Amino acid sequence: MTAEPQVPPFYTKLQGSLPPDFTWGYATAAAQIEGAWDEDGRGPSIWDTFTRLPGKIKDGSTPSDACNAYHLWKEDVARMKEYGARAYRFSLSWSRIIPLGGEADPINEAGVEFYSTLIDELIRNGITPWVTLYHWDLPQALYERYGGMLNKQRYTADFLRYARLCFERFGDRVKYWITYNKPGLTTRAKYAQGRNAPGHVSDTEPWIVGHTELVSHGYVCEMYKRDFQPTQTGCIMITLDGNWYEPWDEKDPRDIEAAERAKEFEIGWFADPVHGKGDYPASMRAQLGNRLPRFTEEEQRVVRGSSDGYGMNSYTAFYARHLDGVSDRSDYRGNVEFLNENSKGNPRGPETDTHWLRMAPWGWAKLLRWIWARYGVPICITENGTTVKGEHEGPAPAAPGEIVEDPFRAELFRAYLAEVAKACQEGVVIKSYFAWSFVDNWEWALGYTSRFGVTWVDYASPQKTRYAKRSAYALREYFEFLIAQ
Ligand code: BGC
C-alpha cells in the first residue's frame, strides 16, 4: 500500500498549529462493528431485538455479523497502526460483559477477556485506548425488567455496577473514559421518533430518559473520581452531539432566536447541566414546562462539573427557520424548522450518501467557538466524518490491497481540520480529533447503506474483508503537518 496525497499549499500558515500532544485517531462502536452477537456468552442488546421487527431498518439488515471485528481485532489494530493513529475510541458492549446487565447478574469472563486483550494489543502498538461505556446498546434484559432508562433508580444502580467493573478490570490501562455517546440524538430517536431501539414515540419519555442519562453519568463520574482516579490517574467525560444552526434569514430576529434555540435544545439540554449553570436552558423550560424534569440539589451537585472535558461529536450544519404559533407537544427541536438552503437560496453544503449530512466546514468553525465561549471547557472532538455520495453503490475494490479513492472524504477532513487548526491558533483549547470511522459499519436504522469508514468493508465476503481508502493516508499526512514536532 502506498500513501501519496499531497498537502495542499494553503495549509502553510497552519503548519504546527496543533500541540505536540494532540490526540488523533479513529472511533467506532461495539454494536456497529463487532458482530458475534451471540458468541462466547454475550447477551442480546435492545438493537438485537429491535432489528428483528419488520420495517425498522432501511435495508432490513441486523448487526449480527456487522464488520466481524470481534474476530478481526488484531488485524484491525495493525491497520490502525499503519494509518498512523495515536488513539482508538471504541465502545464496550455491556451485554458482552454482563449478559443480563443488572447489578446482581453474573459477569461473562469471556467478554471481559476480549476487551482486555484488545486494550493490551492497542497499547503494545502505541495506540491509546479511549473507551465509551455506553454507545446505545442497552442489555435487552434491563429493558424487559424495568423499562431501562425510564426507571432512573434501578437503571442508575445497574449502570454504576457495570462502570465499576470496567474501571476495576480495565482502568489500570485505560486513562480516557466516556460514559455516554451522544445521548441527545439517541434519546430523541429512541423515545420521540421511534427510529432507534427500543422505538418509542412519546412526548414525555425523551426528557425523562435524558434526565436519567445525566444523573447516572454524574454518579459514575463521582464514583470514578473518588475510588479510581487517585490511583489510576485517568479522566472521564460525556460525549455530546451537536450540529451548527444558522438563521435562515440572518436579518429576521425570530430566525436568529430560532437558531439559538435549536442549539439549546440539541446541545444545551445536556451541556448546560454538565458544563454550564447546572440546569436545563430556559428556552427548554419555557416550551416543555413540567415535562422537563427538575434536578434535586444532590443531582445538580453530582452532574455539574462532572465531565473532565467537552466530548464533541459533530458533522454538519443546517439553516434554522422559526415556526409560527405554539409548538405541538411532540416537538423536541424547539419549534424550529431545519432547512438545506437559506433565504437567499444558498445551500448548506454538498450532499453525501446520508440524508442529514452535508459537508459544511463553515458551520463547524462557528460551532467550535460557540461551545468554547459558552462553556470554556477543553474540547475533545470524539467524532467527525462523512459518507460520500454514490460510494455505497460502488464499485467495490477488485483486487486485494487495492486502495479505494475517496477524494470527497479527504477533502472533508482537510476542510474541517483547517477550522480546528485556526480555532487552536486563536486560543480555543482542543485536545483531540477522532474520525468516524475506522471501517465502514452498520449505521443503525440506515443499516449498511451509509459507509462512513476510511476502510472499505466488503460486506458480501464471509470474513468482511477490508480495503484501505485513500482518505486514511490523507488524514495521516494532515496530522503530520498540523501537529507541532
Ligand atoms: C454516532 C455513530 C454514528 C455516526 C454517524 C455518531 O455521532 O455516535 O454511532 O454512526 O454518528 O451517524
Image: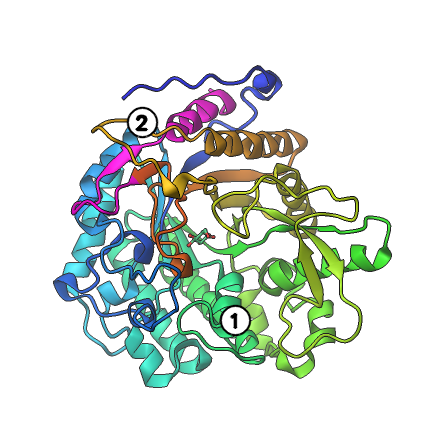
Name the secondary structure under disc 1: loop
Give, as a three-letter code, the residue at label 1.
Gln
Q: Ligand 1 near label 1 (Cβ, under 8 Å)?
A: no
Residue depicted at 61% across the width and 61% down the height = 266
In the image, residue 125 sits, relative to residue 169, either above or below, namely: above
Q: Marks 1 and 2: CB-CB under 8 Å? A: no
Quickly name the residue at label 1. 193
In this rendering, would 13 be left or right of 385? right
Name the secondary structure under disc 2: loop
In this rendering, would 252 be left or right of 177? right
In the image, residue 285 sits, relative to residue 29, either above or below, namely: below
The quadrant of the image that shows the N terminus is: top left
In the image, residue 29 sits, relative to residue 74, either above or below, namely: below
Display coloring? rainbow
| Residue 227, horizontal then vertical, whole percent | 37, 62
Q: Ligand 1 near label 2 (Cβ, under 8 Å)?
A: no
Asked whether the viewer can see residue 135, the reply is: no
Which quadrant of the view contains residue 60? bottom left
Give, as a three-letter code, the residue at label 2.
Ile
Residue 481: in magenta span: yes
Magenta region: 457-485
Residue depicted at 61% across the width and 37% down the height = 361
Q: Nearer the viewer, residue 136 or 309?
A: 136
Q: Which mark is residue 403?
A: 2
Residue depicted at 69% across the width and 80% down the height = 289
